[in-house]
Amino acid sequence: MEKSVLAVDLGGTKILIGEVSLDGEVLGSKVYASTVVSQDQVFETIAASLRDYIKHVGLQREAAAIGIGVVGRVNTSEGIWLEIDTSRSQPIELAQKISELFAMPCTIGNDVYSATLAEQKWGCGTYSNNFIYMNIGTGIAARSVVNGEPIIGGHFNAGEVGHHVVDYDSDVQCICGRKGCVELLASGLGMHNRIVALKPSYPDSAIVIPNEGRVGVEEIFTGYDHGDPLCTEVVDTALQAVAETIMNMVRFSDPDTVVLGGGVVNGSWFIDKLQPRLQAKTMRFVTNGVRKSVIDEAFIGLKGAAWMAIRTISKLEA
């Protein structure tokens, strides 16, 4: 029987479980609700979701390993999920616990690290060994790949570029202790929060703040196209913040390619508006330009988690 792997992509409000073939085809998937309150609770939710998937969705092939992408700091080589964030740190041997429950090898990694691996295997990594993958969604994070190796860092904390300060005159306070971080200005959540904070100063704006949920980026971008002054203020700030972050990262790791993913850059709108803000001299060696990932946004994290599991199988068979 042909083999496959089980992959888990943990987000802030949901878990995506899928079965993936050894060549990267998503054979099936299902979304489960989740809350990222504590690592122990998430472990229980992942375990229950995997059991449900196996029982009710079923496997098309023989699953040989499990790969899991999670938010926060992860020691992938030891299989330890160190923390969700600095306020929720409860190191847990997640890979071993899942491996024991399901009687197969398990590998875990940070969610953006996992997406970067997918990009390296099935995206721009097919033609570049030096690239940046940046995810702009609810938050902002990235990974630099240098000479074929993703930078991880001594404390497994590399790539948290959401905390690049891009506006030194900003009064927007970040949990990291500084002000003017790009995540606060340009992520989906950040733009919503700026809309809410600035709305009283723009009484003529057509934007309506919902009682529940967020103002979606699509609505904000549409308002920008229609000349809404509030949307213009928020989006111009966001675009410049992302441009500064990209150029800072380019100066740091010298890539030939920059790939953007995440819900904020879905479609071409954001990148088209971003391009004129990137300085030619700074970007002169980025010969492949700034582009959107060719991997389906809905599955890039899942496919990255799957690739971690596939590599585990290869190592065991070597």
Image: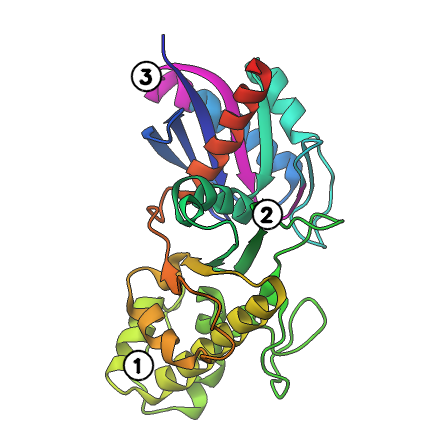
Quadrant assignment, res 170? bottom right
Which residue type carries mark 3? Gln
How crowded is the residue under tag 3: few (<14 C-alpha within 10 Å), some, or many (20+)? some
CA gap between label 1 and label 2 equals 36 Å
Residue range highlighted in magenta: 53-74
**Where is residue 112 shown, x and y percent of the image?**
53, 49
Residue drawn at the location 45% of the way across and 61% of the way down: 258
Q: In the drawing, does residue 146 fall left or right of residue 215?
A: right
| Residue designated by label 3 | 60
**Where is residue 295 shown, x and y percent of the image?**
35, 46
| Mark 1 vs 2: CB contact within 8 A | no
Of the numbered discs 1 and 2, the one sitting upstream in the chain is 2
CA gap between label 3 and label 2 equals 32 Å
Which residue type carries mark 1? Tyr
Check disc 1 and report its element: helix, strand or loop.
helix
Of the numbered discs 3 and 2, the one sitting upstream in the chain is 3
Residue drawn at the location 65% of the way across and 30% of the way down: 94
Pick the front one: 39 or 63: 63
| Residue designated by label 1 | 224
CA gap between label 1 and label 3 equals 46 Å
Check disc 3 and report its element: helix, strand or loop.
loop
Residue drawn at the location 32% of the way across and 87% of the way down: 205
Which residue type carries mark 2? Pro
**Where is residue 81 shown, x and y percent of the image?**
67, 38
How crowded is the residue under tag 1: few (<14 C-alpha within 10 Å), some, or many (20+)? some
User: Which quadrant is the C terminus positioned in?
Assistant: top right
User: Which quadrant is the N terminus positioned in?
Assistant: top left
How crowded is the residue under tag 2: few (<14 C-alpha within 10 Å), some, or many (20+)? many
Q: Return the mark for residue 150.
A: 2
**Where is residue 272 shown, x and y percent of the image?**
31, 72
Residue 314 in view: yes
